[in-house]
Image (cartoon, rainbow, N blue to C red):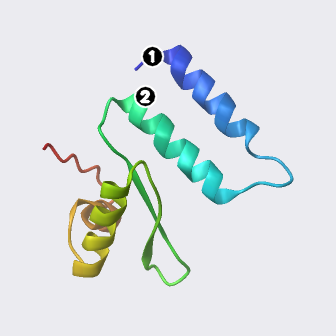
Amino acid sequence: MDQQLLSATFVELADTLVADFDLMDFLCLLTDRCVGMLGVSAVGVPLADRNGELRVMAASDEQVRLLELFQLQNDEGPCLECFRTGAPVSVLT
């Protein structure tokens, strides 16, 4: 991974942490930068609510958003596996 790109991304993300912070803008920026930095085709960000239930918060594109929703609806898939085990899961297509 390009260290300069990583540093620039952290600076850009930190710049969003201001008084009028918008979580959705932050998460959308995060997904976009992850696609570029990690060399993956898409990224989704599910977050757990206070009850431990996952909610899709951001996605790099609509297909990923739908995929995340299908996983949650069916209670299975790589996101749920990662959440439950704490281990990274890679999906090759």
Q: Check the image and name the residue furthest to the left.
A: 93
Q: Check the image and name the residue furthest to the front.
A: 62
| Amino acid type for the residue under numbered disc 2 | Met
Q: Is residue 37 left or right of residue 12?
A: left
From this view, report whether residue 49 is shown above or below residue 68: below
Q: Residues within 10 Å of mark 2 (few under 14, many from 20)?
A: some
Residue 10: x, y in percent?
Answer: 62, 32
Q: What's the residue at 30%, 59% (across, down)? A: 82
| Amino acid type for the residue under numbered disc 1 | Asp
**Label 1: element kind:** loop
Q: Residues within 10 Å of mark 1 (few under 14, many from 20)?
A: few
Locate the N terminus and report the quarter of the image it occupies.
Answer: top left
Q: What's the residue at 65%, 38% (across, down)? A: 13
Residue 40: x, y in percent?
Answer: 30, 35
Q: Is residue 77 left or right of residue 42?
A: left
Identify residue for label 2: 37
Res 17 label? none
Res 2 label? 1
Residue 86: x, y in percent?
Answer: 34, 58
Q: Are marks 2 and 1 in contact (CB under 8 Å)?
A: yes
**Label 2: element kind:** helix
Q: What's the residue at 43%, 79% (across, down)? A: 53
Find the distance from the CA under tag 2 to the CA under tag 1.
8 Å
Residue 73: x, y in percent?
Answer: 28, 80
Q: What's the residue at 53%, 77% (across, down)? A: 49
